[in-house]
Image (tube, helix red, strand yellow):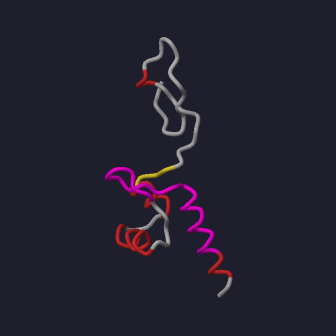
Amino acid sequence: MTMSETQRTRPTGDQPATMVLDSYPRRLLTVAEARDELRLGATKFAELLASGELASIRVGRRRLVPVHAIDDYIAGQLSAARST
């Protein structure tokens, strides 16, 4: 059985926790994952985070980007493109 990032479930009696798959979609992405989703370079992505154009949160020392923040950013860009 291969481990899929989008398929995780709760462990059952004889199933080891390391092989547990989750059926819930991920709601937070790492900076690298979010940057890949938007197909942006590191500098432009850092500018978006610094300016607040792309929302993110800190969890400990990690910065994470909510999936809805990526959707909101894309929607804003589309809206701006339509109004020009």
**x and y percent of residue 81 in the render?**
63, 81
> Which residue ends up furthest to the left in the rendered image?
61
The correct choice, above or below, for 24 with respect to 70 in the image is above
Look at the picture and state if 4 lies above or below 16: below
Q: Is residue 72 left or right of residue 39?
A: right
Say if 72 sits above or below 24 in the image.
below
Q: Quadrant of residue 64?
A: bottom left
Q: Range of the magenta residues?
A: 57-78
Residue 68 lies in quadrant: bottom right
The answer to whether residue 64 is magenta is yes
Q: Residue at x 58, y 68 (%)?
A: 74
Q: Position of residue 7 (x, y in %)?
A: 54, 34
Q: Position of residue 75 (x, y in %)?
A: 63, 69
Residue drawn at (54%, 62%), measured in percent from left and top? 70
Q: How many marks?
A: 0
Question: Which residue is outermost to the top?
Answer: 14
| Vertical side of 48 occupied by 16: above or below | above
Reply yes or no: does residue 72 show up in magenta. yes
Quarter of the image with the C terminus is bottom right
- Which residue is at the far bottom? 84
Q: Residue at x 50, y 12 (%)?
A: 13
Q: Residue at x 41, y 68 (%)?
A: 45
Q: Report x, y in % for residue 22.
A: 54, 32
